[in-house]
Amino acid sequence: MTKSVSLFLCLISSSLLFSQLGPGGVGATDGTSSLKIWYLSSTGVNTTGSLINSIQNRAGITALNISETGTQRPTLVTNAVNGFPEISFSGSNRLRTGLTLTTTNFVTNQASSFIVVRADNNTQTSSVYTTDPLVGSTRFSNHIPWNRNVYYDIGTCCGTTARIQVNSVAGLNNYSFWSYDAHPSSGKQLYRNGSLLQNRAGSSSYTSHASHRFNIGANTSGTSGFVGDVTEVIIFNAKINSAQRIIVENYLAAKYGLSSTDNDIYDEDNAANGHFDFDVAGIGRIDASNIHNDAQGTGVVRMLNPGGLNDDEFLLWGHDGSDLTTTTTTDIPSQVASRLERIWRVSEADTSG
């Protein structure tokens, strides 16, 4: 017990300014990393009643804050997904940036994006997020769904170089987390709940920064407005490595009570283990080219510079959501007066089996 308490106090005290504070502990939140957009339904949301006026970009780039006025404002629904709120779109509202996209703060020919979303119906022809307006030339957009199909586009639409296309996707009215990668040399990959749906070669370049806004909810020319709910949007303007993608997916799965089909490493989020769903972050390694060895995320615990982190090994941690107060006086060593209310659990896994 004494060793465990000492370990966590050491980890908490090591929360330095240069920690990776992004989702799952991947990326910085001051705009200096490839993490450029991070919209959450639970943080930085300004409302009038239940109508959302604006959401701050947690990635630290204020030029990519999103807002709307009047009847264009979507609705914030509290306690909707594993205790977290959701942003509800009716098809006639949206949130978007100004004309502030640049080649530095937005994507060009590569990206990694994540979104947690459900559609009210499978037959709508809509965009969940898109460059606005949605034009037939260069775009960065996704469609979940477009008449039962799912599309992701980067660059000059709509050939196979620019597009991922998965037809007749079922169950879109249930929450899923979607992960998308694009890179000129490794092509494009689309995952749903951690499972690879499609892998296509090539990546086109998005070049319309000066004339476009970034928009979630759509309701702009070229696409119908999205009818459904969103909890989180994450966009990197570079392709992150596979270890980092797996860590972000586990963070999202734990936070929103979703099941990961593949690479479900963090297992302390289920009912049997006590729902340690909060502030999940992690370190891990697939191989020498796909490694993440410094993470803090949204919580106070940071782990970095591990010894003996081998191929296919991961360590992820999260907590039970209790307060950071030292009021608990049970289950402690005799020389300790009290301990933190908050409790952490960890999962260590070798994904090779």
Image (cartoon, rainbow, N blue to C red):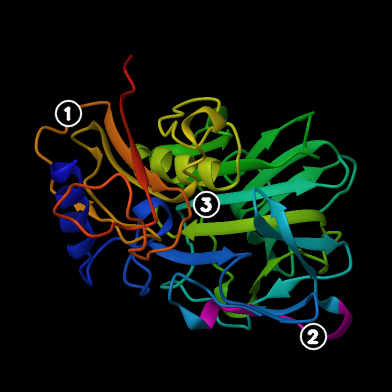
Q: Which residues are magenta?
A: 63-71
Q: CA distance from mark 1 to mark 3?
A: 27 Å
Q: Amino acid at mark 1?
A: Asn
- The disc, 1 or 3, on the residue closer to the chain's N-terminal end is 3
Which one is earlier in the sequence, the residue at label 1 or at label 2?
A: 2
Q: Which residue is mark 1?
A: 310
* Visible residue check, residue 239: no
Residue 192 coordinates in the image, percent (x, y): 60, 34
Count of numbered tags = 3
Q: Is residue 134 visible?
A: yes
Q: Which circle, 1 or 3, is nearer the viewer? A: 1
Q: State the SS at label 3.
A: strand
Judging by the rendered image, the residue that carries numbered circle 2 is 69
**343 horizontally vs 37: left or right:** left
Q: Label 2 vs label 3: CA separation?
A: 27 Å
- Residue at 64% x, 46% y is 152
**Residue shown at 68%/69% (left/top)?**
215
Please state which amino acid type lies under the numbered disc 2.
Answer: Thr
Give the label on residue 113, or none. Answer: 3
Which amino acid is tagged 3? Answer: Ser
Q: Quadrant of the C terminus?
A: top left
Q: Is residue 69 above or below residue 113?
A: below
The numbered mark at residue 152 is: none
Tell me: 207 left or right of 86.
left
Q: Looking at the image, which residue is at 9% across and 38% down? A: 307
Verify whether residue 17 appears in magenta. no
On the image, the x and y values in percent for residue 310 come to 17, 28
Question: SS at mark 2?
Answer: loop
Circle 3 residues within 10 Å: few <14, some 14–19, many ≥20: many
Mark 2 or mark 3, whichever is nearer to me: 2
> Which quadrant does the N terminus fall into?
top left
For label 1, the SS is loop
